[in-house]
Amino acid sequence: MKALAAVSILLSFSAYADNWDKNNDPANFDSRYEYSFNALPKNATLPNNKMPWSSSFWPRKKGSINYRWNTPNPTGFDLRSPTRQQVMSMSQEQLAQLSPAEKFDLARGFYDYPLSTSVAKNAKKDAKDFEGVCDGWTAAAIQFSEPTPVAMTNPDGIVIPFGSSDVKALMSYDFSINQNSGELGSVFVGKYCVVPFGMNLKVGSCTDINPGAMHVILANQLGLKKESFGVDIDSGKETWNQPVYGYEFEVRGQTKADHAASALIIHAKLKYAEDDPDGEEAKNVFTWDPTVGTLKYAAGVMEMDYVLELDYSGRIIGGSWLGNSKTKHPDLFWMPTNKMKFSAEFDYLNKIYKPFF
């Protein structure tokens, strides 16, 4: 028994050295995780009160949070924001069609639109498709319950209506523009694919998340702890952050492993809140009312195949991607560990934000 245990330890160490470097260690998230394959839930979905909310990522090429999403013809550029006199004669329906940034300015009585002006400087019609505030949205959706609609009375007595998407936009923008990973205490498993300007991406230069580490984190974080986290679903140099809410694992066979006692072939589904305003569920990422627990919740699924390596005690020690999943898999997992607070510029959000749950 002692000799067998020693062999198991050596095999575990060999596989770990082969497959799990410090960037891929699940302990970066939590050192108390369960690693035994049979002890981990095969599927999980977060309860509604822990569910991250779907939302637009407010792309720069659409005007960011200057985007007037609640109009028949949404636009985020070349806006003519109403004057104080015009605002005083506008109906609630007309005010509801303004952008999140415009409403935030008006609610505070700022008719010179300082936030809208600042946002306009950051927005670009020729921005890349993935440029937006998906990092801020993901962080906010993980730690805050979905916001409800609210009406705020400004210093002139004008009632400014905010839909759920308006509040989501402001929260996401604040946490993306005014916060940083140090303030959030963000932790990572996997590694971003960073390409210096003027250099070509070389094969093997990016270390994406190990599928064994991915399996451990999904099962522990969602299945056992019932807590969300962020994922960059693009394995290349683009960054597409999404908050995760569920998964499914299916064992489809066994295979040989060079550095493990046994290995399983796994088909997995990773489920996340969606944010693509050009996707099939575009009508659901912009909403006046909350969508968690409703048919309007916008969700995405990534399906993957991989080998899961186990030691003699059945503990997960590594893995490798299979087939199309070698190029189509998550880049990394991440999550903020500090309790997020609105910045000084967005302190008024403490009055606007009303949680759904």
Image: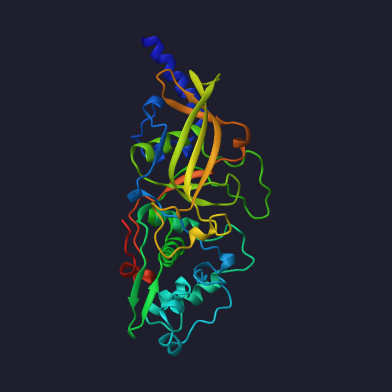
Left or right of 231, for residue 199: right
**Rendering colour mode:** rainbow
Which residue sits at x=40%, y=15%? Answer: 6
Residue in front for this viewpoint, 74 or 199? 74
Could you tell me residue 163's position as x and y percent?
A: 41, 68
Could you tell me residue 237's position as x and y percent?
A: 60, 49
Which residue sits at x=42%, y=19%? Answer: 9
Q: Quadrant of residue 171?
A: bottom left
Residue 26 lies, with reference to residue 93, above or below; the image says: above
Which quadrant of the rendered structure holds the N terminus? Answer: top left
Viewer can see residue 56: no
Residue in front for this viewpoint, 278 or 215? 278
Figure label count: 0
Which quadrant of the rendered structure holds the C terminus? Answer: bottom left
Could you tell me residue 297's position as x and y percent?
A: 45, 53
Which residue sits at x=36%, y=34%? Answer: 33
Q: Residue furthest front?
A: 295
Could you tell me residue 211's position as x and y percent?
A: 51, 34
Residue 355 lies, with reference to residue 199, above or below; the image says: below
Q: Residue furthest bottom?
A: 85
Residue in front for this viewpoint, 149 or 222? 149
Residue 69 lies, with reference to residue 204, above or below; the image says: below
Q: Quadrant of residue 223?
A: top left
Viewer can see residue 278: yes
Which residue sits at x=41%, y=21%? Answer: 314
